[in-house]
Amino acid sequence: MHSLHLKKPLAFFDLETTGVNIARDRIVEISVVKALPNGETEIRTRKVNPEMPIPLESSLIHGIYDEDVKDAPTFKMLAKNLATFLEGCDLAGFNSNRFDIPMLVEEFLRVGVEFDIKNRRTVDAQRIYHMMEPRNLSAAYKFYCDKSLTDAHSAEADTIATFEVLQGQIARYEGMKVIDAHGKEVGEVRNDVAALHELTASKLIDFAGRMVYNEKGEEVFNFGKHNGKRVTDVLKNEPSFYDWLMKAEFPLDTKRKLTEIKLRALTQR
């Protein structure tokens, strides 16, 4: 029995997908927990054949490989029953407003099954989490140093607070393993700048984030029609893309990093 006060069913759901591109990627697993007004719940979980290969970097995150879904029904086969199961339900999830709901709606549209959310309320638990547990410098200063940041947004006060926060973090966490959201160990907090760099370094190649490192450490594009493709492959197969990007309104840092990759590839031939 749940403790929510409901006037209509509230369907919590989560999607595992081939990637994060709403237009291109597909669902490989969907789980729905339907909370009913009488306090009961119904749970349905199904693997879905995405009718496309699952990229290895996605499989390494959610643990679902092509072999696991080859005999599963396609979304088209599940769509009508799923729409019926969700009929009359409001929707809830974690980061659902930004990803899961748009992805689900897109899948229904592809197969021509009506799934209107205009009259549904949506609840995103991540939004509540971020609103109630701020992740700004003032909150960190209070948590790690037990002090109030009275001069927030003054450059000197913010800098000194950050200096104290890092020391507080090391004092609290030194020697502890860091586990990511998928249960994978990604490092250890140590009082060592090199170790802290490895732990916190961004996967971005350029500051604008147009190129990133994938799970294999390869340089890939992070936007547009070549999203997820290796930069070197695109430069080799479509040389005009480099010329287009260099002439378009991209940051100089992005152009510089792309040129570095291109020159490196040429010297390795």
Image: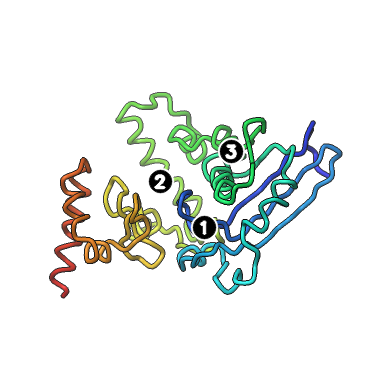
Amino acid found under the numbered disc labelled 2 = Leu
Q: Residue at x 64, y 41 (%)?
A: 115
Quadrant of the rendered image containing residue 151: top left
> Would you place residue 208 above or below residue 229 in this image?
above
Task: Tell which circle, 3 or 2, labels the residue nearer the N-terminal end.
Answer: 3
As helix, strand or loop, the secondary structure at mark 2 comes to: helix
Q: Residue furthest right?
A: 38
Question: Which label number is shown at residue 129?
Answer: 3
Mark 1 highlights which residue? 180
| Render colour scheme | rainbow
Task: Tell which circle, 1 or 2, labels the residue nearer the N-terminal end.
Answer: 2
Q: Residue furthest top?
A: 150
- Pick the residue in front: 18 or 38: 18
C-alpha distance separating marks 3 and 2: 23 Å
Residue 211 in percent (x, y) is at: 30, 54
- Pick the residue in front: 129 or 179: 129
Residue 89 in percent (x, y) is at: 73, 38
As helix, strand or loop, the secondary structure at mark 1 comes to: loop
Quadrant of the rendered image containing residue 65: bottom right
Question: Which label number is shown at residue 166?
Answer: 2
> Would you place residue 9 above or below residue 225 in this image?
above
Give the class, few, some or many, for how many residues have Cα within 10 Å of label 3's Cα (few <14, many ≥20): few
Left or right of 29? Residue 215 is: left
Q: Residue at x 58, y 38 (%)?
A: 129
C-alpha distance separating marks 1 and 2: 20 Å
Give the class, few, some or many, for how many residues have Cα within 10 Å of label 1's Cα (few <14, many ≥20): few
Amino acid found under the numbered disc labelled 3 = Tyr
Residue 188 in percent (x, y) is at: 46, 61
